[in-house]
Image (spheres, helix red, strand yellow):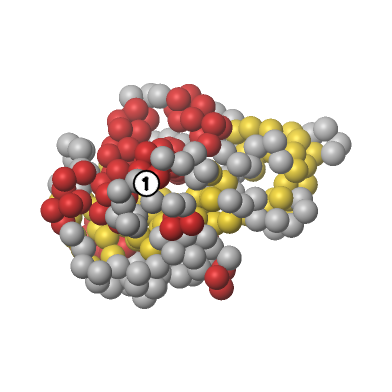
Amino acid sequence: MAFDYSLFQSHLETRQLGREFQHFMSVDSTNAYVKRVARQDTSPRSGLVVVADAQTGGYGQHGRIWESARGQGLYLTALLPAQATPLVTLMVGVAVIEALRAVTGSEEPGLKWVNDLVLRGRKLGGILVEACHQRWMAVGVGLNLRDVPEHRGIGLDSLPPQEGMADWSREQILAEVLNHLERWTDRLLAGEGEAVRTQWDAYAVTLGQDVCVESAGREVVGRAIGIDATGALKVRTGEGRVELITTGTVRRADGAYC
């Protein structure tokens, strides 16, 4: 289905994000493309947004392959000024979940530490924030619009469209994601890190669960009890120690995804 730019614009409220917009039927990776722009252009435009119908080389955290077939999802990357805070990924997650809840009217979409979007215990999407030559960051979001059975991924179409809608409009979803992303980026730049952490807590499905974390070649088992000021996950082990996890893969202790 062709991308309806006028519909996208009708929902867009941001001052900056989406001001320069590029849409591809197919690209290797929206993040890779934006990073090339930042590398090749001495003064790339902050607010550049790249969207693709499909990716031939989509990837997520730790370089994992991200399935990106046409008609299956929404794949986008925004170019933003770099921020000297480790809370960016959590902030993006908060913005995307708020956007999805606003569009769908459902409070079911949630967040799994550190960068997963989840719905009904399955993966709905992911976030990938990458540095671009110190001055910039590529903020990537991959969202399943349809189920991905081979990876047990769930699609947003599992939620019924609101009254009067035949299906979810990716143009409206994209616009709302950018609207909320700009608002939360401004808040983080204004020093509202505590607001990011508070809102992330409210949307998190990880906290309060018994988890197993694979991190830096070791395994940490315990209960996820919160995040610290840097966004690190706090896990209380059976021995009573509180481990701070800054990177790693989190699953429930019983092996479930979340």
The answer to whether 255 appears left or right of 145 in the picture is right
Q: Nearer the viewer, residue 70 or 186?
A: 70
Q: Position of residue 246 (x, y in %)?
A: 59, 44
Which residue is depicted at the point 54% across and 31% down? 202
Q: Mark 1, residues whose alpha carbon is within 10 Å: few (<14), some, or many (≥20)?
A: few
The answer to whether 180 appears left or right of 247 in the picture is left
Residue 142 sits above or below residue 227 on the image = below
Q: Nearer the viewer, residue 69 or 131?
A: 69
Q: Nearer the viewer, residue 176 or 127?
A: 176
Q: How many marks?
A: 1
Q: Position of residue 212 (x, y in %)?
A: 73, 50
Q: Amino acid at mark 1?
A: Gln
**In this rendering, does residue 216 appear at all?**
no
Please state, as top left, top right, bottom left or bottom right, where the N terminus lies in the image.
bottom left
Which residue is depicted at the point 70% across and 36% down? 208
Which residue is depicted at the point 41% across and 60% down? 145
Q: Position of residue 257 (x, y in %)?
A: 65, 55
Which residue is depicted at the point 22% across and 60% down? 37
Q: Position of residue 243 (x, y in %)?
A: 71, 38
> Farthest front residue?
164
Residue 254 sits above or below residue 86 on the image = below
The answer to whether 42 appears left or right of 55 in the picture is left
Residue 1 sits above or below residue 208 on the image = below
SS type, badge 1: loop
Q: Which residue is identified by label 1?
A: 162
